[in-house]
Structure formats: C-alpha cells, structure tokens
Image (cartoon, rainbow, N blue to C red):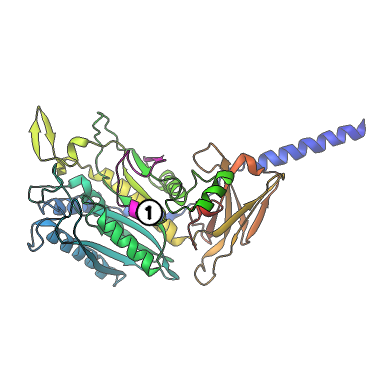
Amino acid sequence: MKHIFSAGIALALTLTTATSYAQSPPSYQDQQRLHDIAKAVSAKHIEQDIRTLVGFGTRHTLSETASDTQGIGAARRWIKSEFEQISQDCGGCLEVYFQSKTISGETRIPGATEVVSVIAVQRGSHDPDRYVLMSGDIDSRVSDVMNSASISPGANDNASGVAGTLEAARVLSKYTFNGSIVYAALAGEEQGLFGGKILAEQAQKDGWRIKAVLNNDMIGNIEGINGVINNTTARIFAEGTRQTETSEEAITRRFTGGEVDSPSRNLARYIDWMADRYIPNLDTMVIYRLDRFGRGGHHRPFNDLGYPGVRIMETNENYNRQHQDIRSENGIDYGDTIEGVNFDYAAKLTALNAVSLAGMAWAPSPPAKVKIAGAVKPSTTLSWQALSSKQNPQLKGYKIYWRYTDAPQWQYSRFVGNVDTFTLENVVIDNYFFGVASVSQDGAESPVVFPGAAGAFGE
C-alpha cells in the first residue's frame, strides 16, 4: 500500500511538472528605446508631407514629369530631396537613389514610360546584407485608371504610406542597427505593381537577404464605408503557403503542417505583438489572406519571389474616397482628398512600422535551417543552424515558442541559451506548433521561425 501511494504521488508530480512546463507563458524583455521610437513619430510631420504630396495635383504614373510643381516627376524629386535631407541630418547615414525601368506594352502602360521609385538604405553595422523594408506608393489615380491629367490628390491612397515611410526614416536614422533598413517610395502601383516588381527583382539579383517587407497602403482613414469610425484598430494582411513552394515541399507540409506559419504569417504575428507592447490604444487584426479580397498591393511582388511580406493598413476603408473623380453626388462627396485623412492615426500606424523595423534590425537574424523531431515520442526536439558571431555579435541565444494548433498567436516560450538544439520534455509534438526566435543580449527578438521550408526566413 505504501508503494502504491508513493507511485501515485510520483505520477501526480510528473503530470504537474509536464503541465506547468507546457504552459509557461511567453516571456519578453521590454525595450525602452522602442517606446522612445514610438513616441518620436510626429503627426505634424506626416500632415506636412501628405499636404505636399497632394499639392502636386496628380501623381499618376503617366502624368507630367518635367514640371517642378505638378505631376509624378515633381513628386518623386521632392521625395528624394526629403530623404537626402534626412541623410544630411544623420551625417550621411542613408544611401538615396532613384530606381527606374522603362515599361511598355502593358494594359495600363501601353507606351514606353519610365517607372521611377525612390529608395533610401540605412546600412547595418554588422550584417548589412540583411534587410527589413518599409514601403509606400507614390502614384495616385481617379476613376479612369488611364486618366493622367485630372486632379488626383491621393491623400490617403497613398500619400499616407509615403509620408509614413519618410517619417519612419526621420526617426530611425537617429539610431544605429545591426541589420539594414530600406525605406522605399514605390512607383507604378496603380498601373500594375511595377515599382515593387522592379525592386524585388533587383534585390534578388543583388543577393539581398530580405527578412521583412512592410507595405503601407492607406494608413490614414478612420471613417469606413460601413459607417464605423475607429482609430484604435489596423489590419495586417499576410499570405499563407509560400508562392515559391515546390511540389516536394508541399508533400512535406501536408504531413508536418505550416499552412498558417509561413514567414509572412509569423512576420504578421511579430508586428501584432509589437502593437500590443509599444503602441497604446492600437489592436491589430492579422488577416490570413494575401490582401483584400481579389485585390493587391506592393508587397505581392516580394511574396511572389518568396520573401516575407505583409500589408499594413486601416481597418475600415471608405470606397467613396478611393479611385474616384472628385465630385459630389446625392449628398455624397467623392474623392481621395486631405479631409479624409486622420493624421494622428497615420502617425500611430507609422509608429507601429518604426518599432517593428527597429526591433528586427536590432535583433539577430532569424534562425535558419530550423528542424523538428518527436514523432511517437513524449518530447519534442528542435534544432537550427548556429548564427555567425561576426554577423550577429549581439546574439545572446535562442527562444523556443509553441502554441496549440488552433491558436492564432504564440502561447508559450522558453529561452534555451546559445545552443543549436533543445528538447522540450513532456511536450508532445502532435498537440502544438513550434518555432524558434533568436534573442539579443538586451532582449530584442527576431520573428519566430516555423520548422522546415514552409516557415523558413532564409539564410
């Protein structure tokens, strides 16, 4: 009887230990400098920039290029001058340049047209070939996508995204990061996502190790077509299975999972957590879709090449203010004018971008070659490739995350030190999804990497 009683106590202790171990909530080291970055974003600066962009009359891809005051040419030269001023203020910390390609024979660009984007790169100190990117779209349009002459303010779509990108550069250029940050004002979005295609293809050609693309397209409207007025929520669109997945990888994914753990989805989860931790009064909604239903944005060309990318935007769109001739009909005002932009809200979403970019650029590179094992075993083992100490001198170690398979966000975590393999005892592989993040000495973390090709962020 004594033996049975002792065994029962031992079993109870084992179950208690296993349960508490499997339910240790995520730990996180707060970063004061990210709070400082969020507070530094200026709604006043964003308003000034949006008003300047609206003042160019139209920014249609096929519009005037020679004028200094009207059309797409004047707009892109002004954007470049702003980036150059930011660089001057930080002692030349930005590499600023035009990136262009002549497009013709397309449905929306039938004649030869130079599509010109403005790129600014803030090089990292130790891992300059690792990039995180924020973008907004320069161009605007009215009801007729081929109408390049009519007034097209494009205040929210998408002067707000360009203004946010400029402001993020102003704030983040005051800091030094381990990885590189790219600020991109992309052209030709309304005519076929051409600016994004040009940059993504060039980045691939140049061997950029892109870990995140944050595309900002309409971040200033709070009054929805549905009658909702709300400045406390935002959407993050993130595709599932990678576009570049091979047939062999698809077979593996069928048996191991990963449909909701693409790098884009885990990038979205990372940004969602940043909102919770650093942006007061903002709740982000991660949407499991490439973009709005049947629609597209400038993150897609990066997704097409396999890079992690998401779209950040307002929750409640107002279609009367998108792609519309300026007019009033039946008491309704149509057109994307400055009156439809809430500058404080645009600043809030800009701050979300800034802290997310900074967190990833300060963190070590996301772990590569993450693998998992544990079939028909009581425990789960994860392994990964150790990061280069030369590229990641800030590395402290790695943290394993896991969650129930139907949970949208990571629920449990454990810091396991500077190792390249670890076994979670009594955590059964069949009941959870798992991932690994890298952690810096001061607590900055990379996005979580799901094991296998389905979740890989690359080398």
- For residue 311, say whether it is visible: yes
Q: Relative to residue 12, is residue 388 depicted above or below? A: below
247 left or right of 21 in image: left
Residue furthest to the top: 330
Residue 53: x and y in percent read 15, 53
- Boundaries of the magenta span: 281-301
Q: Relative to residue 82, is residue 152 depicted above or below? A: above
445 left or right of 181 in image: right
Residue 433: x and y in percent read 57, 44
Residue 370: x and y in percent read 57, 56
- For residue 449, say whether it is visible: no
Q: Relative to residue 98, is residue 443 depicted above or below? A: above
Q: Using the rendered view, name the quadrant where residue 385 is placed.
A: bottom right
Q: Nearer the viewer, residue 418 or 375?
A: 375
What's the amino acid at mark 1?
Answer: Asp
Q: Is residue 293 magenta?
A: yes
The image quadrant where one finds the N terminus is: top right
